[in-house]
Structures are given as structure tokens and as C-alpha cells.
Image (spheres, rainbow, N blue to C red):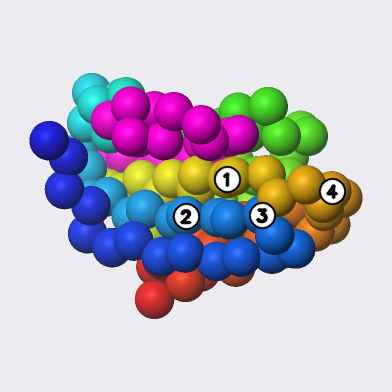
Amino acid sequence: MVYFAKEVEIVEKKSKFLGYFLHCQTLSEVEEALSYLRTIHKKATHICYAYSLESPFLEKAVDDGEPNGTAGRPILSVMQKKGVSKACVFVVRYFGGIKLGAGGLVRAYTKTTSEVLN
């Protein structure tokens, strides 16, 4: 069982964005949390995420099918601006039927990440 430090929910034009913050030290912890989220959110449209690990230094941003650079990169950017490391942020999206466009996706993923890190 994975225990997240914080969880938030944001709704943008009927799409639901669920943010999860996890303190982690290793890539295996990130992979375990992702597997857990895929299990409990089987009907989610996307599970996008970014992580920053210290030893060894490793950062990664994953869009999980969203247009390139509209999900994982904004998540990682917020983490970097807030100085968050040894952590992972996941954002689970349930599509609400209204397309948000690239700018709308970036704003939604950025807002969800900011909320979960506050």
C-alpha cells in the first residue's frame, strides 16, 4: 500500500484532475506508486507525473498520452520552482468530454501540482 503525503482534486471544464504528492528516495518507490494508482484509477484517461530524486540525481516528466509537453513538463517545472526534491507528483485525469487545448492542459496540470504542493 502506498501512502501519499497529500491529495487534491480540481475540476476544469468537466475534466477531473486528482493530484498526489509522494515523498520518495528511489525509482522503485515511484514505480510502485504508479502501479498502485493504475490499479485504483483503472478508468482514468491519463496518469501523468514527474519526479526528482537526489541519489543518484534523476528527474523525469511523463505525459502519458497527453500532447507532448502539456502535462509532465509543467508538473516538473512547478516542482523545480518550489525546490521540491526526493518527491514525485502524479496527476490523474478523467476526461470530461470538453477538450481543453494545449494551454488549458498546461494550466490544469500546473494548478493541480501547485495545489498538491501547497
Work out how far the residue at label 2 is from the one at label 1, CA to CA, in angstroms. Answer: 6 Å
Name which residue type carries label 4: Lys
Pointer 2 or 4: first along the chain: 2
Name which residue type carries label 3: Ser
Q: Which residue is mark 3?
A: 15
- In terms of image quadrants, where is residue 61? top right
Q: Residues within 10 Å of mark 3 (few under 14, many from 20)?
A: some
**Residue 84, placed above or below residue 2:** below
Marks 2 and 1 close (CB-CB < 8 Å): yes
Work out how far the residue at label 4 is from the one at label 1, CA to CA, in angstroms. Answer: 12 Å
Return the x and y of residue 24 as percentages of the image width and height.
22, 43
Q: Is residue 81 visible?
A: no
Q: Which residue is mark 4?
A: 99
Tell me, for residue 18, which label it has, or none: 2
Return the x and y of residue 98 as percentages of the image width and height.
82, 51
Q: Please identify the residue farthest to the bottom as the structure is shown.
A: 118
Q: Is residue 48 magenta?
A: yes
Marks 3 and 1 close (CB-CB < 8 Å): yes
Name which residue type carries label 2: Leu
Marks 4 and 1 close (CB-CB < 8 Å): no
Marks 3 and 2 close (CB-CB < 8 Å): no
Q: Is residue 57 magenta?
A: no
Marks 4 and 3 close (CB-CB < 8 Å): no
Q: Is residue 115 visible?
A: yes
Q: Residues within 10 Å of mark 4 (few under 14, many from 20)?
A: few
**Residue 54, placed above or below residue 11:** above
Residue range highlighted in magenta: 36-56
Q: Which residue is mark 1?
A: 93
**Residue 101, placed above or below residue 35:** below
Return the x and y of residue 16 as percentages of the image width and height.
58, 56
Name which residue type carries label 1: Arg
Work out how far the residue at label 3 is from the one at label 2, CA to CA, in angstroms. Answer: 10 Å
